[in-house]
Every structure is written in C-alpha cells, then in structure tokens.
Image (cartoon, grey):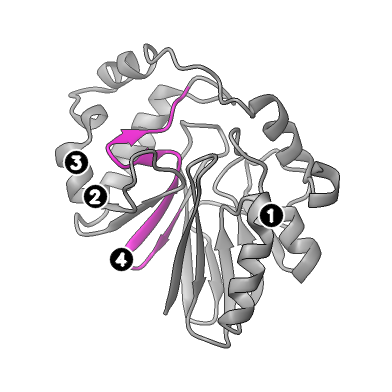
C-alpha cells in the first residue's frame, strides 16, 4: 500500500494520499490548494491515477485543493451528505463505503467541530479530520459546532474502535504525525472527563481567536475555488 502524509506549514494541515500500489488508482484526503502541484508531481512519480478526493469538512483555516484537483484530473469530489459545499460530486452517508482498488474507507458521521465533520475508517487507521486531534479536540464554537455532539462523536463512536487503531488527524500543531485510540484515551487532556457536561464546560471556555483565513476560506470552500480564482 502507498500511504503519503503531507504537511502544510501555513495551516498545519495534514493531507493524505492513499493507493493500493504503484500504477494504481489513488485518493487524496484534505488537500490544500497551494500544494496542488506538489500532489500532482507525487502522483506522477508514483504512477498513480487520482480518481477521488475527499474533504473531511468545510475547512476554515485554508482553501481546499479539492476543486482544483478535480479540474486537473477529473477525479470525483466527495464530502459527507451534510456538507454545504456547492461543488461536491458525491455525498456520502454514515456507514457507506468509499472504494478504490483494494482501498476501502468506511464513512463515519462525527459532527461537533462543525455540523459537516466526517471521519473515515480504513482497516487499522482512522482519518478524524478536526473532530479528534492528537492530545486535543477540534474547537466547537463556529460553523454550527456543538460540544455535546463532539463528545458523542468522540466517546460513542471513535473511542469505541480497537485501542490499537491509528489516529491520523487533519491538523497537528506540535510536530506529531499520528496517535492511537489507546494513547488518546490515556493522554488526551480533553478526554479525561466523566460526562458530556464536563467536556462541554472545557470546550465552551477555550476562548480562541477565529482562524485568520476563516472569512475567506469558508465561503471559498463552499463555492469551490480553483487556483486562478484564488490568485
């Protein structure tokens, strides 16, 4: 299997390229617009054909490369069925599967960070978007986020997975690349709570500033901006 984890320094975003092998079909999760050429060059190097591109949610801190990649490769644009994106080709629902060759992703609806947050489970790993981070959880104070939904998504869905399951988030701000369900249960400070109310109390008092690009990124990601439109 080909598994590439790429990082955007500006927004601390992780992008993932998956394929069952060289010369096969590929999919990309959470691409960043400015790195489109980097993704395309890597696909060419690995002789991969990009057929699907997925965003875990409408991002507020960067403009997605989803639309530009589709424009350049004719790949299918995929998001969850609660997404407000106006350019998605395929909207997936809870428990549906996204397949290419021998890659199979199970769709999990995990709202809380936003109302359109989805996670994608593949065998021994889960791509959690912003709902569950490494030693943290995604904020719940904009884009119809909700701390009680976040608690439910994390405790009643994601943390129910086998403890050895690898956790690959859409962001990390401390240089960590992945975690495990076991590590997050034990070490994530926001998960050391005894109730949804206790978790909500933490989330409701983070008092974070809005992402710097929020006013630009959210509408751009809903409309589906390409490189020419962004420049």
Label 2 with label 1: CB-CB less than 8 Å: no
Residue designated by label 1: 66
Label 1 with label 4: CB-CB less than 8 Å: no
Residue designated by label 4: 124
Using the numbered discs, state the Cα–Cα distance from disc 1 to disc 3 in whole angstroms. 32 Å
Looking at the picture, how far across and down is residue 213, in whole percent?
Answer: 64, 29
Q: Earlier in the sequence, mark 1 or mark 4?
A: 1
Label 2 with label 3: CB-CB less than 8 Å: yes
Q: Nearer the viewer, residue 87 or 168?
A: 168
Residue designated by label 3: 185
Looking at the picture, how far across and down is residue 58, in whole percent?
Answer: 62, 39
Q: Earlier in the sequence, mark 1 or mark 3?
A: 1
Identify the mark at residue 150; answer none if there is no mark. Answer: none
Residue designated by label 2: 181
Is residue 199 toward the left or the right of residue 78 in the image? Answer: left
Look at 50% across and 19% down and name the residue there.
141
Q: In front: mark 2 or mark 1?
A: 1
Is residue 95 toward the left or the right of residue 62 in the image? Answer: left
């Amino acid at each position: 299997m080909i598994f590439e984890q790429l990082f955007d320094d500006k927004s601390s975003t992780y992008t993932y390229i998956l394929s069952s092998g060289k010369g096969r079909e590929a999919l990309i999760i959470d691409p960043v617009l400015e790195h489109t050429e980097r993704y395309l060059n890597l696909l060419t190097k690995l002789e991969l054909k990009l057929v699907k591109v997925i965003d875990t949610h409408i991002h507020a801190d960067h403009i997605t490369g989803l639309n530009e990649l589709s424009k350049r490769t004719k790949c299918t644009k995929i998001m969850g069925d609660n997404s407000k994106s106006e350019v998605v080709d395929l909207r997936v629902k809870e428990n549906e599967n996204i397949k290419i060759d021998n890659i199979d992703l199970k769709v999990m609806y995990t709202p809380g960070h936003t109302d359109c947050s989805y996670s994608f489970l593949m065998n021994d790993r889960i791509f959690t978007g912003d709902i569950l981070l490494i030693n943290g959880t995604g904020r719940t104070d904009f884009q119809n986020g909700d701390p009680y939904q976040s608690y439910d998504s994390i405790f009643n869905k994601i943390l129910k997975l086998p403890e050895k399951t690898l956790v690959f988030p859409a962001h990390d701000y401390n240089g960590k690349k992945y975690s495990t369900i076991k590590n997050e249960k034990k070490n994530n400070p926001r998960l050391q709570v005894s109730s949804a109310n206790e978790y909500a109390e933490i989330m409701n008092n983070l008092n974070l500033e809005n992402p710097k690009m929020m006013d630009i990124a959210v509408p751009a990601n809903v409309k589906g901006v390409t490189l020419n439109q962004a420049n």
